[in-house]
Amino acid sequence: MLLGATGSIGSSTLRVLSTHPDRLELVGIAAHGNWRRLAEIAHEFGVRDVALFDPAACAQARASNAFPEGTRFREGPGGLAELSTLESADIVLVAVVGTAGLEPALAAIAADKDLALASKEILVMAGKFVMEAARRKGTKILPVDSEHNAVFQCLEGHPGPGVRRIVLTASGGAFRDWPSEKLVRATPADALKHPNWAMGKKVTVDSATLANKGLELIEAQWLFNLKPEQCTAVIHPQSLVHCLVEFADGAMLAQLAPSSMTFPIQHALLYPERARGVEPPIDFTSLVRLDFAPVDLERYPMMRLAIDSMKRGGVAPAVFNAANEVAVEAFLAERIPFLAIPGIVGNALDRAAHFEPGSLADVLAADSEARRGAAADLPNFK
Ligand code: MG
């Protein structure tokens, strides 16, 4: 089951499926609104169960005749959740942008499916509730985010108490080598030139601010049941080492792979089996360099805000995430400059009523409140 089939993770997933047709079968697909691409995938992989988040797109899809005969359509957030519980699915890969993946992820857990998680917002916002539900059900959660998948690989067989900390690697994003003065004039087109990874727009901008790494620290905290101070990051320009795990004795394990999402996706889908990869491994017959540098919190204020949010806990990570989404969208629409993003998020965190959420509804309320506030704040940053 693949939610987010038409996105960047979705297309890497399809490459993994095409490489292992003997091991993996696609039984359902969902997308936000791109029904034409969804129809192509349905034909190519023989899928009859589909869902579209956007009801208008779903109506067009139904009327189009583009899908295989006998296709069963579902629509809206409920449609994605329903798809996740299909009898025929063993594992649900959630790779939909933003918070739309939350309901389907919880539905999959309730229906005893394994969960492959690519959407970090799910754990950033509702880590407490998702992990609680997963523990109750004994759900296997397989991280698809490259760094978390790497931590998962390093931790296997090593009991929790022996782990001192994890170190997620960050490429430093599109502006890693820019002088600070020049950042004032950074445009969306500049921010979208990521040095190593081909990804969606939102996450590429988040890589340039390091908000992405901040969200990943919060995600890691929940996935691996760590304290905030055990989740750290380092700049690693080559994106070949995806994480380091440091143990009590000071020894470290690292996980390396080329910077392609097919590696973590395949690991999550075939786990615990190892099989031939989609792409060739790192080639050490030519020069390979691995550099590491500390994260400069002055240069990357979004990282500092993320760490503060993680330490503060409660609804703070949800507020950080929501305000960042509003700010990044405004930056991509050229409504605010690049350097305004941390200002908007910082203000949202200052304004927010901080409390420990008692339910998912509390988190969603804090999320919409932060979005409203951040949107109203945008004109102050023109
Ligand atoms: Mg990542």
Image (cartoon, helix red, strand yellow):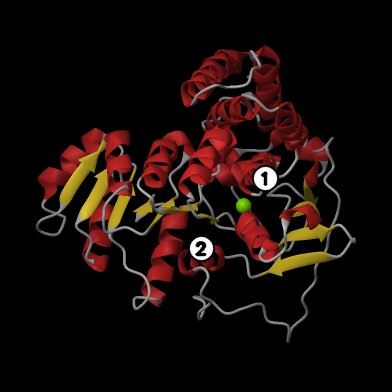
Q: Secondary structure at mark 1?
A: loop
- In the drawing, what numbered circle is on residue 310? none
Residue nearest the viewer, comparing 300 with 140: 140
**Residue 22: where, in percent of width, then height?**
34, 78
Q: Secondary structure at mark 2?
A: helix
Quadrant of the drawing holding the C terminus: top right
**Residue 36: where, in percent of width, then height?**
25, 52
Q: Image check: 253 left or right of 21?
A: right
> Which residue is drawn at the image coordinates 66% and 12% (left, top)?
351
- Residue underneath mark 1: 225
Residue 377 position (above or below residue 261): above
**Residue 375: where, in percent of width, then height?**
54, 18
Instruction: Name the kind of residue labelled 1 in the image.
Output: Asn
**Residue 94: where, in percent of width, then height?**
43, 49
- In the drawing, what numbered circle is on residue 268? 2
Q: Is residue 5 visible?
A: no
Mark closer to the observer (1, 2): 1
Mark 2, other Cα within 10 Å: few <14 / some 14–19 / many ≥20: many
Residue projecting furthest to the bottom: 285
Q: Image check: 323 left or right of 182?
A: left
Residue 347 figure quarter: top right
